[in-house]
Amino acid sequence: MNTFILDLLAFGAVLSGVLVITSKNPVISVLFLISVFINAAGYLLVLGVGFVGISYLIVYVGAIAILFLFVVMMLNIQISEIVSVGREYTKNLPLGFIVGSMFFFELLSIVPASYTEAGELPLGLFNYINGLFLGVNSPFMSSDVHMTFTGPGADDSFASFLQIEAIGQGLYTYGTIWLLLGSVILLLAMLGPIVLCLRSATSDK
């Protein structure tokens, strides 16, 4: 029964994600985005990761998605603009299909087949492409990138932890580099719009 519910929630999340990018009306698109977050939160709750699931509901649905919805509803969007966007969208469907196919090919070639192989990522194709663009053909170029954590025994040390303790232990012990990198990216995402707005304001004066 749990497997059927998980499959149903996963299918609902994927379907809602597709409808987010295919909907012509931005309000409907934001509603489907809220549906994506709700399905993902339900998937995590059924899976037993209650803390992350509740965090999804509070942070994404309760704050970000509702903010998006109010902002989009306050915009003065004309029907003619929606129709013109739909026409431009249909013109870009072949390009989107090509880019999506390339993305899924790279994703399926990188993601490990089992949990025991999660300690390394095969990146032979990326190394080959980089060698073509950069003109580098080094014999020391490895086809595997070993990550900063070991997968097989990861859950053994979390047996006596609460969910939030296990998340903190794994995040700050084995994923410190990725956490710092993500924080820098978020900082740039916050500072970028401010810098752009300041430049436009000074140019108008």
Image (spheres, rainbow, N blue to C red):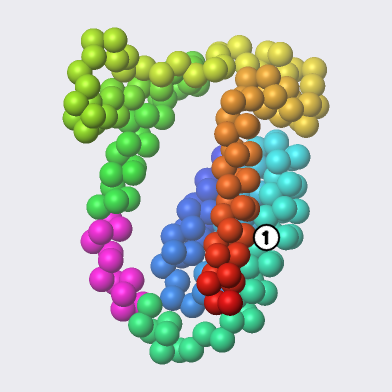
Secondary structure mostly taken by the magenta-highlighted segment of the chain: helix
Q: Secondary structure at mark 1?
A: helix
Residue at image location 69% in from the left, 49% down from the top: 56
Residue at image location 41% in from the left, 67% down from the top: 22
- Classify 117 as above or below 103: above
Asked if the stretch drawn in magenta spans residue 175, the answer is: no
- Picture coordinates of residue 170, whole percent (x, y): 67, 23
Residue at image location 68% in from the left, 13% down from the top: 156
Left or right, 90 with reference to 119: left
Question: Where is the C terminus found, in terms of image quarters?
Answer: bottom right
- Classify 47 as above or below 93: above
- Residue 63 in sight here: yes
Residue occupying the far front of the picture: 205
Given residues 17 and 175, the one toward you in this image is 175
Residue at image location 74% in from the left, 27% down from the top: 168
Given residues 194 and 203, the one toward you in this image is 203
Question: Where is the N terminus found, in terms of image quarters?
Answer: top right
Q: Quadrant of residue 141?
A: top left
- Picture coordinates of residue 136, whole percent (x, y): 22, 22
Which residue matches tag 1? 64
Left or right, 63 with reference to 125: right
Within 10 Å of the Cα at label 1, are there few (<14), some (14-19), or many (20+) other Cα atoms?
few
- Classify 80 as above or below 11: below
Left or right, 187 with reference to 92: right
Q: Which residues are magenta?
A: 86-97
**Total numbered badges shown on the rendered structure:** 1
- Residue 151 in sight here: no
